[in-house]
Amino acid sequence: MTLVAASVGDGAAGGCRHLAIIMDGNGRWAKAKRLPRIAGHREGVEAVRRVVEAAPGLGLEMLTLYAFSSENWKRPADEVSDLMGLLHHYVKNEIDTLHKNGVRLDFIGDWQALKPDLVRLLAAARDRTSANTGLRLIMALNYGGQGEIVRAARALATDAAAGLIVPDDITAEMLEARLDTAGLPPPDAVLRTSGELRLSNFLLWQTAYAEFLVTETLWPDFDGPALATALDEFSRRERRFGGR
Ligand code: IPE
Ligand code: IPE
Ligand code: MG
């Protein structure tokens, strides 16, 4: 593996400020090792730790991690409960370190619909880190892009019904301001591990001009050097945004 003067040297991740990651392949990692799926999810948490630690040194300012989709409720109840337990564990155990490192933690998706004790923990972690100026770490929890757009449309409709806005005047910016990601720049790139070539309902609106980065590496094997390699690939892309 060549490691990557561009992402080390220019301090700006080859221009990537905001990376969104579809952390996929925990189950296959476990299966390949004849372990239960939870073992893959546990190692997945270690990969989160490594990537969050490496991200600022590679010039990333924002990192959005797809941790649980609104479709992941279809999984067996014991796997869902394992995933929620690991999330609880991660935030509880990691919050001091994150705070010390200046990370600002935030959430997108319908995370307030999770179990009350988890919601309390997440809200406290968000509030405690809200003034931090380091890496912005955004975890997508109970997140689905279609649901997010529906909620934004509903908010616009509510404002229109109340006479606060006029339907014909609705703009992309007004819809954007009602998405969970309001105020955040869109991701420059979406990275998916484990080789799948799909968005799986992640950031449908926000990825309009994102670069796709796909690696065969399974998420539990992902680490700082793998992140540097991905950002190096990003730095060699030519972005056009419809221009020429
Ligand atoms: C990603 O790994 C973790 C979540 C979706 C929560 P998977 O559990 O989807 O792993 P695979 O795709 O079955 O390998
Ligand atoms: C996407 O992965 C969701 C997360 C990484 C949280 P999935 O494994 O759920 O996606 P599909 O089902 O393969 O499309
Ligand atoms: Mg998967």
Image (tube, helix red, strand yellow):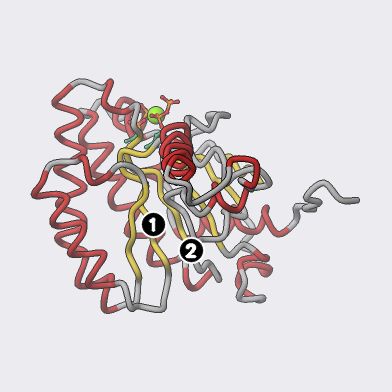
Measured Cα–Cα span from mark 1 to mark 2: 8 Å
For this orientation, the residue located farthest to the front is 163
Q: Which residue position holds label 2?
A: 62
Q: Is residue 69 above or below residue 130?
A: above
- The image quarter in which residue 16 lies: bottom right
Foreground residue, 220 or 199? 199
Q: Is residue 154 above or below residue 166?
A: above
Which secondary structure, mark 2?
Answer: strand
- Please state the horizontal and vertical placement of residue 62, each as a whole percent of the image: 48, 63
Q: Is mark 2 within 8 Å of ligand 2?
A: no
Q: Mark 1 or mark 2, which has the lower sequence index? A: 2
The residue under the point 46% across, 53% down is: 181
- Please state the horizontal and vertical placement of residue 212, each as a whole percent of the image: 63, 42
105 left or right of 178 in image: left
The picture quadrant for ligand 2 comes to: top left
205 left or right of 151 in image: right
For this orientation, the residue located farthest to the right is 244
Q: Which mark is residue 174?
A: none
Q: Is residue 171 visible?
A: yes
Q: Is residue 140 above or below residue 127?
A: above
Q: Which mark is residue 138?
A: 1
Kind of residue at badge 2: Met
Foreground residue, 57 or 16? 16
- Please state the horizontal and vertical placement of residue 209, each as a whole percent of the image: 68, 46
- The image quarter in which residue 42 lies: top left
The residue under the point 75% across, 52% down is: 237
The residue under the point 28% across, 49% down is: 45
Foreground residue, 128 or 56? 128
The residue under the point 58% across, 65% down is: 17
Kindly check if marks 1 and 2 are in contact, taking CB atoms under 8 A apart as contact. yes
- The image quarter in which residue 205 lies: top right
